[in-house]
Amino acid sequence: MFLAMDTVFDQCSIAILDASGQVLSSHTESGKRQQTQQILPMIDAALSEAQLKLTDIQALIFNRGPGAFSGIRINTAVVQALSVSHDTPCVGVSSLQAIAQTAYQQYGLKEVYSALDARMQQVYFGHYMLIDTIMQPVHPDNAEDGEQLLDYHSQTALNIPIVGNGAGLLTLHDGQIIHTETHPDATVMGRLGIAQFMVDGGTEAAHALPKYLRNQAWKTLKEQGKA
């Protein structure tokens, strides 16, 4: 049994899945203001619905980022705490891989550019291709500006769709398919995490780390020109 969670995509999403990816419990509350208050009761409710205890969970799966700084910290901290208290392995899943996997499940796309609005005139970007039902990275996740993306894009196929809320910020090719409404939940995180767990067995809490993709995760008001 696997417990998956996400607080990065402006939501609090919890799911419990078995090793085959079958969903035993799944609940998502939209919005990010109450995530810290919601996440633990939602985990308790999911375990109760699935008639399980935390000791029954084989691995804890979380969204490691990139994305919203506070959202990454919330689900990472919860996973680390549960991992330490119950000696349970952790599996971090890329938010960009989750977007790509959702695009495959929703639209049948087998190769995509996954893009998240990173603010500060940048986009979190990854290139993914389907391998055995899982969208796997072709290009490492990175925080890039438009010029860097154009350089990369010029070396790859021009007709690759762009998915995620950063898709509308990129004008890489006329007529290129974009899907900005691609919203993964904890079930997507869970299935990706299970696939990863079967490969590497997860990691201990000390190594269950967020992936911000840039050293400066925020700007001061002065740096934003608002002070």
Image: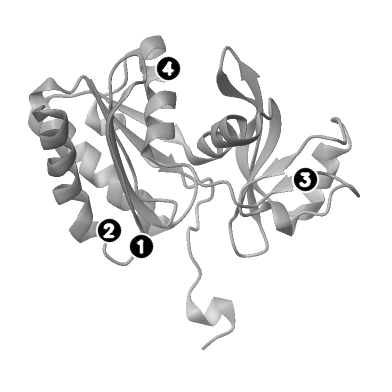
Q: Earlier in the sequence, mark 1 or mark 3?
A: 1
Residue annotated with mark 3: 149
For label 1, the crowd category at 10 Å Cα-Cα, with few meaning under 14, some 14 to 19 and many 20 or more, is some
Q: Amino acid at mark 2?
A: Gln
Which label number is shown at residue 32?
A: 1
Provide residue 115's location: percent of width, then percent of height.
64, 46
Q: Amino acid at mark 1?
A: Lys
For label 4, the crowd category at 10 Å Cα-Cα, with few meaning under 14, some 14 to 19 and many 20 or more, is some
Q: Residue at x 23, y 20 (%)?
A: 1
Asked if marks 2 and 4 touch (Cβ < 8 Å), the reply is: no
Residue annotated with mark 4: 195
**Callout in the foreground (3, 4):** 4
Vertical comparison of 177 with 85: above or below: below
Q: Residue at x 48, y 42 (%)?
A: 184
Q: How is the image coloured?
A: one colour
Q: Earlier in the sequence, mark 4 or mark 1?
A: 1
Residue annotated with mark 2: 35
Q: Earlier in the sequence, mark 2 or mark 4?
A: 2
Q: Residue at x 41, y 25 (%)?
A: 191
For the residues labelled 3 and 2, the Cα–Cα distance comes to 33 Å
Provide residue 171's location: percent of width, then percent of height.
83, 54
Q: Earlier in the sequence, mark 3 or mark 2?
A: 2
For the residues labelled 4 and 1, the Cα–Cα distance comes to 28 Å
Q: State left or right for residue 34 relative to residue 95.
A: left
Q: Amino acid at mark 3?
A: Leu
Which label number is shown at residue 8?
A: none
Asked if marks 2 and 1 touch (Cβ < 8 Å), the reply is: yes
Secondary structure of the residue carrying tag 4 is: helix
Q: State left or right for residue 219 relative to residue 8.
A: right
**Callout in the foreground (1, 3):** 1
Provide residue 40's location: percent of width, then percent of height.
16, 48
Task: Tell which of 165 and 214 is nearer to you.
Answer: 165
